[in-house]
Image: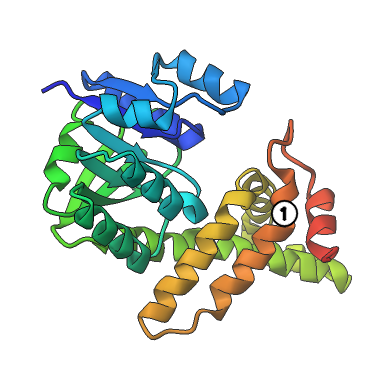
Amino acid sequence: MSRTIGILHPGAMGVSVAASAKNSGNTVYWAGEGRSATTHQRAEDVGLVDAGSLADLCQQCEVILSVCPPAAAEQVAQDVIATEFSGLYLDANAIAPQRAERIGQAMAEAGITFVDGGIIGGPAWEPGRTWLYLSGQSAPEIAACFASGPLETSIVSEQIGQASALKMVFAAYSKGTTALLAAIVATAESLGVREALNAQWSRGGSTFAEETEQRVRRVTAKAWRFEGEMHEIAATLAGAGLPDGFHLAAAEVYSRMADFKDAPETPELAAVLQALLESD
């Protein structure tokens, strides 16, 4: 069944989610008011319909998909509630399960059907590479919006918060260890033992040293976004009764690399290490 779907917002990840919804036979709108020329071009490239304002988007659409930086998730939800939207809302942001539950409660009180989501993988342009995990009683309705892919979907349960919880514990390792490696390499550089560390990592023909360098350099493009995600993971661990300090430190590591956002090319390792070692 074709549906009218709104995407908030078509960033690098959001536009790929929107493209999968469109590929599945739906009409997909976005709210171009106040957005950058880059975002306008991104939306145009995949054939999204510009509804203009958020209010107009919510009036025209049956389903709203929220794909935004973690820190903005609750405000975006509140903005949608303020339009008196009464359809189906997916929060697919990297947020702690406690935050997902709060948003879900606010949505329920406003008469909006809520589904919790978490995306694992990069922008969804190839089948089998990116998964949207869903939880909530209406999760099958959201899954149906992406029936033709390439975004894959999987329903975790009917309990709000579990999709976000899965995303958090997965990213705690995948993105948390990248921050740890960045801090290790920067510390080794500061203490004058980076070459010796690389030599040790390379024993037995291991390529770990080269892989680590590439991992630390490439993450700079998304560090600005991962900072907020680390705070959400810290809150997730704290909510489970575990220490939150590691991921709070990871947030600081990503904060020091945040200025590489929108860099025209991947920075050299020397520039990344300089940014990490020059704290305010």
Image coordinates of residue 123 in percent, x first then y, are 44, 35
Image coordinates of residue 258 in percent, x first then y, are 70, 51
Image quadrant containing the C terminus = bottom right
Disc 1: which residue? 257
Q: Nearer the viewer, residue 190 or 70?
A: 70
Disc 1 residue crowd, few under 14, some 14–19, many 20+, Cα 10 Å: many
In this rendering, the answer to whether 14 lies above or below 92 is above
Q: Is residue 118 left or right of residue 279?
A: left
- Element under label 1? loop
Q: Nearer the viewer, residue 279 or 187?
A: 279
- Residue depicted at x 74% and y 59%: 256
Q: Taking the image as drawn, is residue 150 in sight?
A: no
Q: Is residue 72 left or right of residue 195?
A: left
- Residue depicted at x 27% and y 49%: 133
In this rendering, the answer to whether 29 lies above or below 110 is above
In this rendering, the answer to whether 183 lies above or below 29 is below
Q: Nearer the viewer, residue 73 or 130?
A: 73
Q: Nearer the viewer, residue 118 or 185?
A: 118
Instruction: Give the residue type that dot 1 points to.
Output: Met
